[in-house]
Amino acid sequence: MRTHCHAYVAKSSINGFGVFAARSLSVGSFIEVGITIPVSFDSIDVYRLAWTDDMDCIATGCLLMYNHSDEPNVSLVRDIENRTITVVALRDIVKDEELTFRYACGPWW
């Protein structure tokens, strides 16, 4: 599993804090992998991501800091078996650009 992160957290003009590119990235570039901790729907009351039809998850890494955009520049790729979410560039991204994903994307969000 890749563990290097090509992103950092800083103040955002979108909302509070956000995640930014630590270097220029080309479309399809790996940005980070966040380990997830699956939890039942009613077991914990914190920010969590939808995981499967009957479970949510708590994510690690910068995953909880990405802001929403209707025109996102990254995608989240879920790996149920390995309990990870990989962040991948949807287009070329310049160094220090804020990284965003669409919160309403996919059937698992």
Image (cartoon, rainbow, N blue to C red):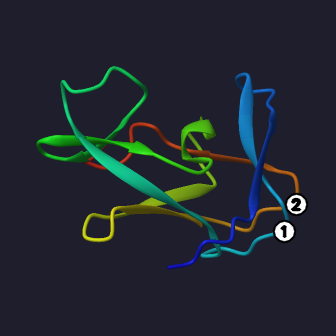
Residue for badge 1: 24
The residue nearer to you, when weighing 87 against 44, is 44
| Earlier sequence position, callout 2 versus callout 1 | 1
Residue sitting at 40 percent across and 63 percent down?
A: 84
Measure the C-alpha gap from mark 2 to mark 1: 4 Å
Discs 2, 1 touching: Cβ within 8 Å:
yes
Could you classify mark 2 by the number of other residues whose Cα lies within 10 Å: few (under 14), some (14-19), or many (20 or more)? few
55 vs 89: above or below: above
Q: Nearer the viewer, residue 59 or 23?
A: 59
Is 45 displayed left or right of 11 in the figure? Answer: left
Q: Is residue 30 visible?
A: yes
Residue under numbered circle 2: 95
Across and down, in percent, residue 31 comes to 65, 66
Q: Is residue 69 visible?
A: no
From the top left corner, tell me how far across and down residue 61 is, in percent.
59, 51
Task: Give the residue displayed 13% in from the left and 45% down from the top.
Answer: 53
Query: Where, quadrant-wise, is the C terminus in this rendering?
Result: top left
Q: Which mark is residue 79?
A: none
Secondary structure beneath label 2: loop
